[in-house]
Image (spheres, helix red, strand yellow):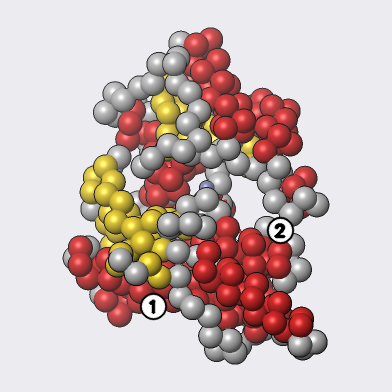
Amino acid sequence: MADIRILAIESSCDETAAAVVSNGRDVLSNIIYSQIDLHTIYGGVVPEIASRKHIEKINPVIEAALREAGCTLSDVDAIAVTYGPGLVGPLLVGVAEAKAIAFAKDKPLIGVHHIEGHICANFIEHKELKPPFMTLVVSGGHTHLVKVVDYGRYEVIGRTRDDAAGEAFDKVARAIGLGYPGGPKIDAAAKNGNPDAIVFPKGKVGDSEYDFSFSGLKSAVLNFLNHAEMKGEEVNRDDLAASFQKAVVDVLTEHAVAAIRQYNVADFALAGGVASNSALRASIAGACAAEGVNFYCPSPVYCTDNAAMIGVAAYYEYIKGNFADYALNAIPNLAL
Ligand code: KG4
Ligand code: ZN
């Protein structure tokens, strides 16, 4: 059978990305234009600025992805795009672009769920990984514990009730003056700090074994900072970063272990931007080893937002013939 090549587009937040993926597993190109520098001075992503930058960058990014893959639009078998969840303006840029290319070149169009993309990022470097398996998607917008029942079939077991894990990292980093994006900065600061210096509450939800809550933890960090300031005490930022990170990592690991035991899976995969966190990787890898479960995690370039993961997810829709029509629209709160 001839190779199936999919051109994938991702623009749900602050990365303008395009990739060409062959047969759902081989990445022929993966171009990411990160807007992080543009948003840093505002301390977070400004949707209107992101939308405008996506419009400016999307064509050059797609051209670069095709060039690197050694193909033209005529050579690809389908056009895939993230249509939600995410910021509506940024999503619309990708969706409009994908529809225009699909129409002009008469190619099938595939709409992809952003979280499904993050999960599928694990298939790129782990050719042996196949459903069913358990996965934890931790990003700036999402914290989902999901059982991957089959390709394209998901059972959400737990999710955050308020802030996402990455959002908590970003807010705490801002509060202690580390800047945006906070995750990598807290990760680095925590390496020099004592994780047992301050005991913060774990983000648990009373009535659910698997749901998460991180807003209480964030408030506890802010209260700690306020009290220290009122008493004129110096705060050790490295200790605070390490202690906060430990509280997040511990609760994520505990829920992951409970899910592994209850659902009796042989494989566990981490995904999303926060999956780059060194303490989280080490903690979940250790827990999986103790449970006798295989641990998978993408390289950092496939943890953060990228289009290769969208091309992987799209392949499994392509082989099912699950195509979108030109009514495809951006859905900011699309459910998994
Ligand atoms: O998946 P992603 O690129 O975008 C979303 O879909 O949200 O995730 C971005 C999030 C940000 O909150 C960022 O602070 C966090 O991932 N992040 C990290 C690390 N690297 C990125 N959080 C903790 N530790 C890291 N090393
Ligand atoms: Zn993402």
Residue placed at 60% from the left, 64% from the top? 169
> Does label 2 point to a residue whose CB lies under 8 Å from ligand 1?
yes
Percent of width and height locating residue 76:
47, 23
Rendering quarter of residue 59: top right
| Residue holding disc 1 | 286
Q: Quadrant of ligand 1?
A: bottom right
Task: Look at discs 2 and 1 and give the one toward the viewer.
Answer: 2
Pointer 2 or 1: first along the chain: 2
Could you tell me residue 205's position as x and y percent?
Answer: 38, 67
**Considering only vertical position in the picture, is 148 above or below 284?**
above
**Between 213 and 76, which is closer to the camera in this rendering?**
213
What amino acid type is highlighted by mark number 2? Tyr
* Picture quarter with the C terminus: top left
Residue 131 visible to an observer of this rendering: no
Dot 2: element: loop
User: What's the amino acid at mark 1?
Assistant: Gly
Asked whether disc 2 touches disc 1, contact meaning CB atoms under 8 Å apart, the reply is no
Say whether residue 187 is left or right of residue 152. Answer: right
The answer to whether 39 is drawn above or below residue 249 in the figure is: above
Seen in the picture, residue 132 relative to 104 is either above or below; the reply is below
Horizontal relation, residue 3 to residue 37: left or right:
left
Which image quarter is the N terminus in? top left
Q: Is 294 left or right of 29, judged from the image as shown?
A: left
Q: Residue at x 33, y 31 (%)?
A: 317
* Residue 231 in sight here: yes
Quote the CA–CA distance across marks 2 and 1. Answer: 29 Å
**What residue is pinned by disc 2?**
180
Residue 21, numbered label: none
Q: Residue at x 69, y 27 (%)?
A: 55
For label 1, count other residues whose C-alpha is less than 10 Å away and answer few (under 14), some (14-19) or many (20+).
Answer: some
